[in-house]
Image (spheres, rainbow, N blue to C red):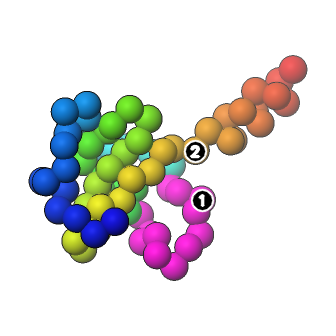
Amino acid sequence: MTANIAEIDHNSCIARPTVETRPASLSAQWWPTGVEKGSSFQCGDWYVGEKDSFVYGYRPETVGFVIDQLDKK
């Protein structure tokens, strides 16, 4: 979304100066490569950051984890 991250209510969020996460597997023209590494807040399961006047939020993928757990059974 187009927004200024400073104007978003962060009461339920935790500031995260750096985020270690897997790259997103999402492939879309509107999703900038590596934007997930620029996240500055964690809001529940979601990570939120700003790039070029747009605010991006994503939730780390768990599909690989679930498949790995099913394979172990």
Give, as a single range, the part of the protein colored magenta: 23-34
Most prominent secondary structure in the magenta stretch?
A: loop
How crowded is the residue under tag 2: few (<14 C-alpha within 10 Å), some, or many (20+)? some
Q: Which residue is nearer to you in this view: 18 or 15? A: 15
Mark 2 lies on residue: 61
Disc 1 residue type? Ser
Measured from the top left, where is residue 42 in percent x and y?
32, 38
Q: In this view, does 11 lie to the left or right of 34?
A: left
- Distance from disc 1 to disc 2, alpha carbons, whole Å, reads 8 Å
Q: Earlier in the sequence, mark 1 or mark 2?
A: 1
Measured from the top left, where is residue 58 in percent x and y?
45, 51
Mark 2 secondary-structure assignment: loop
Mark 1 lies on residue: 25
Give the quarter of the image for residue 73. Answer: top right
Give the quarter of the image for residue 54. Answer: bottom left
Identify the residue shown where x is 60% and y is 59%: 25
Mark 1 secondary-structure assignment: loop
Judge whether residue 18 is colored magenta. Answer: no
Identify the residue shown where x is 46% and y is 70%: 31
